[in-house]
Amino acid sequence: MNFFNDLTLKNKIFISCLGFTLVVSVLIALFTRALLITGLTGELKKRGIGIAQSIADSSRVFILTKDLAQLTALAYDARLGNRKDIVTYLIIGDNQGNILAHTFTTGFPPNIREIVKNQNYEREEINSFNVNHHSVFHVAVPVKEGIYTVGSVQVGLDKQHIETLISKLRLIFLSFLSMVSLIFFFLSHRLALHITKPVSSLIHYTDQITKGNFNILSDDELEKGQFKLGAKDDEITKLTNSFMKMTSQLKQSTDRLKKSQKKYRALFQSGPNPIFVVDKKTFEILDANPNATQLFGYSRQELLGMSLFSLGSLDRGELIHKHPEGETMVISSKVNFYKKNGGSVFVNIHTSLSEYRNEDVIIVAATDITELVEKDSQLIQASKMTNLEKMSAGIAHEINQPLNAIKMGSEYLCMMREKNRKIKDKELGMVLGEISTQVSRAAEIVGRLKTFSRKADFSREVININECVRSVNKIIGRQITLQNIDLLLELDMSILPIQAHNNRMEQVIFNLITNARDAVNERIETVRDIERGRIIISSFSDQKTVGLDISDNGIGIESDRMDLIFESFYTSKEMGEGLGLGLPIIQGIVRDYHGTISVNSSPGNGACFTIIFPAHLKEK
Amino acid sequence: MIRVYRGVIIGFCWGFLLIFTGACTNPQQMSLAPENRNGITTDEILIGSSLALGGHAGYLGTQMLQGAMSYIHHINSRGGIHDRQIRLIALDDQYDPTLCLYNTQHLILEEQVFALSCYVGTPTTVRIIPLVNEAKIPLVGMFTGANRLRQPVNRYLINIRASYYQETQAAVDLIVGQRGLDKVAVFYQYDEYGFDGLRGTEIALKKYGLIPVAKGSYVRGTLDVEAGLEKIIQSNAQAVVMIGTYDSCAKFIILARHQNFTPLFHNVSFVGSKELARRLGVNGEGVIVTQVVPPPGPTLGPESLPGVKEYVSLLDTFYPDSKPSFVGLEGYLNARILAQGLERAGKDITREKFIRAIESIDQFDLGIQNPLSFGKNDYQGLDEVYYTMIKNGELVLIK
Amino acid sequence: MKILVIDDEKPTLSMFKLFLTAYGYEVYTAQDGERGLVLFNEICPEIVFTDIRMPGIDGLEVLRRIRESGIASQVIIITGHGDMEKAVEALDLDASDFINKPVERQALNSALARAEKRKQLPLDPGFECSGKQQEGNLSVFLKGKLTASARDVFSGKFNPGVLNDVEQVCLILDDGFSIDRSGISLLTEVIQGLRQKHIRVFMENLSYNYARVFQMAGIDKIAVLKEALPEE
């Protein structure tokens, strides 16, 4: 059985078919042969007895008369024609065992006398003997007259006759067997081939494909899904077709994979952004593209194995918790990273999960936005200076007030002293007190200006937006009031803090207030509407967000301009009054802090700008 | 894989080969028994014969035996063949096939003769064909032209005289071809011999596009010819081919003549022409008998054939009381051929060698004008048929 | 003499009060325009100081209403830095003078002096000018209110014939000289005409505040301005 197990499928099928056919054929042949032999032998014996009996009937009278010539003739008659083949010899004997007539011509077999003598004459008997090298059935039939036996007819039935028949049969059966075997030899061979050839072809193809060799099949063949395996429309063909489709898909996807791998490799290598491949668990850098090494000044070898966090102030929690499967997302923007030489670099961090050399990794793209950040900051500063310029008149006015009091107070004292006039203590005290108060007031104004104009650094702080509103109010609140506009603060004292730059937030609020003021003034000037100007600043917050509404009853914004107002260099003001950088910069700042800005307005009904920031939740 | 596959194929091939060889091995292993030398002794060759020496056909057997014995005596008197005397054992079978069979079995088994010879009659000879075949014993010269002894060709049955087919053919040739008679009737003995003649006549007539106008028959050993005669008279036949024995045929002709029915009567050689002529007497005028040997007899002239002369002289030497006859001449010729075969077979004779020797006889001159030839698959010695007509109670050779 | 000071700055008001009380005036103060006007109508002060920038009714409006009320008062506008545009506007409304914050004693004195002097003058003084040539130096005295209507009078002084030998022109302003927007234009036009003839122009006896106004009009770039010495 081991031998069989070792065979190929083809040979198994082949040998099984052949073996089965052979065994069945042989069994059929043997069975039929046995049946025929039994039948034939029986038939032979019957015929022999029949012959013997007919001879016995005819010979009775001649036995009694001892007419040997007639008996001999009778005996020979029994062998006439076809019977000669069956009847080897025929002996007619008397009741004494003497032979009266027989059909031997070439010589009397020596043992026959014994046989005849020992024969029981009273009844029919069939024995097997060997006479003259012939196997015979010796059939003896008694010849009776009345109830007494007068003689016997003994017939030698040639077994050879049967054997000849049997050998003929055997020949026929063997020919039949051989034909069947030959036919089945080829049939099963063909069958086995038919079944196994496609299968072995498939195996061959599969092996090739396993080795990654897709070129064994032309693209044409793959597309058509045909290759010549011989089978037409059977399960093998279906299997083949499925296999073809699978291969085609596999090849296509492998090709695509290769292409995309190439593409990604190229992107990785030549991409303008520094890209790191980082281990998902340890955050160890596994690979870095040339741009990364160039930007950070480390060699690739130095970078490998470093922790990503040692490069900059990246929030570990953010990196761990925010990576939705398959999506690229901005994890942090304007993250401060450090070069090898200590230089500072600002980057936007984009991450996506991926697989690299069978490990789960995070692809970290660190876009260098240092220049952008600096430009941004310059722009914001410039805008701030513009604001300052705009403010200068008001500031000057404001600062003039305390100065005026101081000046007048001190001039008064001088004048009194020059004229040697006595200054009342009460007056002196009042003047000196006033001077001191006014100096403080001036200093405060200057201080606020200083804060406002200061160029902010990039470190975010946790701030309360209400504070920003208040400090802006201090700067321009009075000016707004001087322009006959009510500036109302409706601040929710329970709002959550946000993470931002105080200075920048002030700038945002400042800009929005001045815009509102301009809108109110424009309404009053153009529409001659005597309704008093009003600007309401309200803060609010919910669980996660903090917001600020700055609404006015100014001229409003026409709906078709609503989209334009956040675009750079769009301005509603006359040439020279504004660069049109106000709202775009505000929007930029708001977005920096992951906030949104929106506006709700209609012409004549004022406008309401809403900015919303994510609340800074307490550290866990 | 290929190796396994090949191995399987080769295995199957061998298997088939073995099975086939087994199947083809003949179970009838014909063990070539040592050459049978029955009947051959240092100084004697035994020849057996069963023939009618008595009964209604006793004349034929007697004549035949005397003819043959005259030559055998002649040979023996001259020292025999290869220093062996030929001894012929003749048994009387009364023209009875059963007895003939019994005799033959006795000759072969008990007497252990070397060969058989000089059998007389169709039914008798036909009866012993199985024995001849079984014992593989040569039978040389039979007084019968039966087709059964010639077809199918049997190398143990060596015929010397022409067949009934040849005789009837000749008869029809004469009747239809020469005399231009087309109404031919057949009168035949209802047995093997008669059937043979009937078939021969019919075959011959068929060549002329004719069929017998009437067929009449009688039972062997009887003289009941009247019914057959009546049928033939009714047909107004112009000629009657008769295949029978002299007694019934003579009665037929005499009765026909008494009824003024006088067609051309044509008999074959087996009829026994001398006896026929004797019995017919005046009624025999014009009756034609075909012969397979030339007519012997006292009418022998100086122009007589040398073979016939020798027969007549030898018969006269050994059987002075006997008259030469057609049958006797045949017996004589049989003995000559037998002796020639024994001679040619050589001293170390076997039955097989004897038959081969017979086959070697070619253009052998018996002194009867027609040479005799045997050959492989040709065991018919003489093919010539002689026409004789009864004139004044004598048989006259006609051309 | 009653003086009304209107300013939204409390400290300023108290300082003014100190000063003016010390100068012997009867000082009233108001913290916005509305209350100031009410007070003005009540007490009819001779001199009014009003801050130009105030919530509600601003200084110019106060001036306008005072002029409308027909009550003759000298209104001095208190201006801040960069309020010159409004100051010129105030001149059109016949404001007496400006006083710049922070208020200096000299400017205060000067303004008070001018106000008191103008109080003496007729309400609508005509423009007069007289010239005196001394070698290449032409001195022209300007008196009264210079407006566009005085074009012929004023530019007649600088006929081409007259200026043949003139190398420099000296414009001497009278203490009661006043000017409005159209007057400033005319003055600028004339001076530019002179400059084309390569004649140097001096302006003398400019009040402290007018010097500021002219500076703002750009006259200081085409003429040499000489301020009047403050009186003691």
Image (tube, coloured by chain):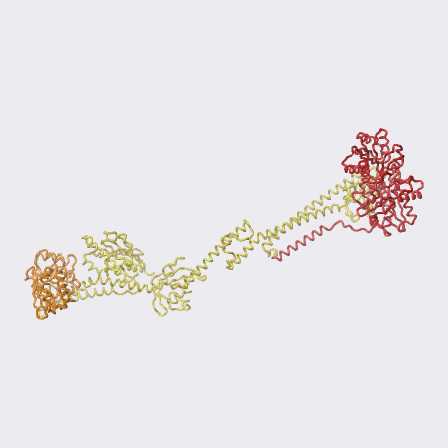
Chain colours: A yellow, B red, C orange
* Observer-nearest of B43 and A11: B43
Q: Is residue C6 left or right of A249 when viewed as pictured?
A: left
Question: Relative to residue A535, is residue B228 depicted above or below?
Answer: above
Percent position of residue C145, x then y = 9, 61
User: Which one is in front, A122 or A151?
Assistant: A151
Count of numbered labels shown in the rendering: 0
Residue C163 at what x, y percent from top left? 11, 67
Please tell me which residue lies in front, B372 or A329.
B372
Q: Give the quarter of the image for residue A62.
A: top right
Against A419, residue B215 (above or below) is: above
Q: Quadrant of residue A406?
A: bottom left
Extreme residue in the top direction: B259
> What percent of the width, then of the height, locates residue A585?
28, 60
Residue A322 shown left or right of residue A509 in the figure: right
Residue A433 seen: no
Q: A184 or A109: which is nearer to us?
A: A184
Residue B344 rendering spot, x and y as whole percentages = 85, 50
Q: For residue A84, what is the image quadrant?
A: top right
Q: The C terminus of chain A appears in which quarter of the rendering?
A: bottom left
Considering the image in quadrants, where does the N terminus of chain A appear?
bottom right
Q: Look at the picture and state if A548 lies above or below B334.
A: below
Q: Tell me if I can see residue B355 in this picture.
A: yes
Position of A359 relative to B142 (above/below): below
